[in-house]
Image (cartoon, helix red, strand yellow):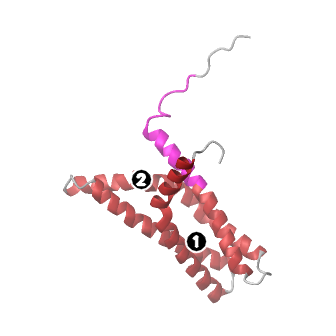
Amino acid sequence: MSGMSVDGAAGWWRAWRDRFGLAEVCGTLTAAAGFAAGYAQAGSLLVAAALATICEAIGFYGCIAAKTGAAARRATAHLGGWRRLAAGAWHAVREQLASCAVAETVDGFLIRPGCMVGAAWLMRALPGGVWIGFAVGKAAADVVWYGLEASARRGVRIVGRGGIARPVRDHEKVPA
């Protein structure tokens, strides 16, 4: 871990686990159920991967929605009525939706089903290869998703601080 202290790595892990740990477990379980149902019914890896992607999104975002709703409820406890509803919705958008939406759009339509189909197809000749491929494809898609999400979250944070609202002044004439 070049350049990262043990406390930094442990802090990063704790932050990830607190934000996504339970949602990842829920998403993985529902993805496996969707993959099994799709493959058993249609015998098609494409159908299985599509159903796994849909089921995973439902499990993952159902958990995220419950956690975000509870956090918004705590954050807006001092407000009442429509102000609380509006502030709670803004809290949810700022905390989850803004960073997850970009990653999920690319992931849900292209990356996740492609990774699961591709890995399951490549490993289908091995004993249990379809399931090994499902697991490898899901893990690969998760790595890509979390990379996209982290990048989007960083962009949301920069915009929130007004970091890109200022004009860039780097056109100074360089002496020859």
Whether residue 153 is visible, yes or no, is yes
Could you tell me how far apart the alpha carbons at marks 1 and 2 are, in whole angstroms?
Answer: 23 Å
Is 128 left, or right, of 53 in this rendering? Answer: right
Is 89 left, or right, of 80 in this rendering? Answer: right
* Dot 1 amino acid type: Thr
To which residue does mark 1 refer?
53
Q: In which quadrant is the C terminus drawn?
A: top right
Identify the main secondary structure in magenta: helix
Most distant residue in the bottom direction: 41
Membership of 163 in magenta stretch: yes
Mark sitting on residue 95: 2
Residue 17 pos. (x, y %): 49, 61
Of tags 1 and 2, the one toward the viewer is 2
Quarter residue 63 falls in: bottom left
Quarter residue 97 falls in: bottom left
Q: Which residues are magenta?
A: 147-169
Q: Is residue 37 above or below residue 71?
A: below
* Dot 2 amino acid type: Glu
Q: Secondary structure at mark 1?
A: helix
Most distant residue in the front direction: 6
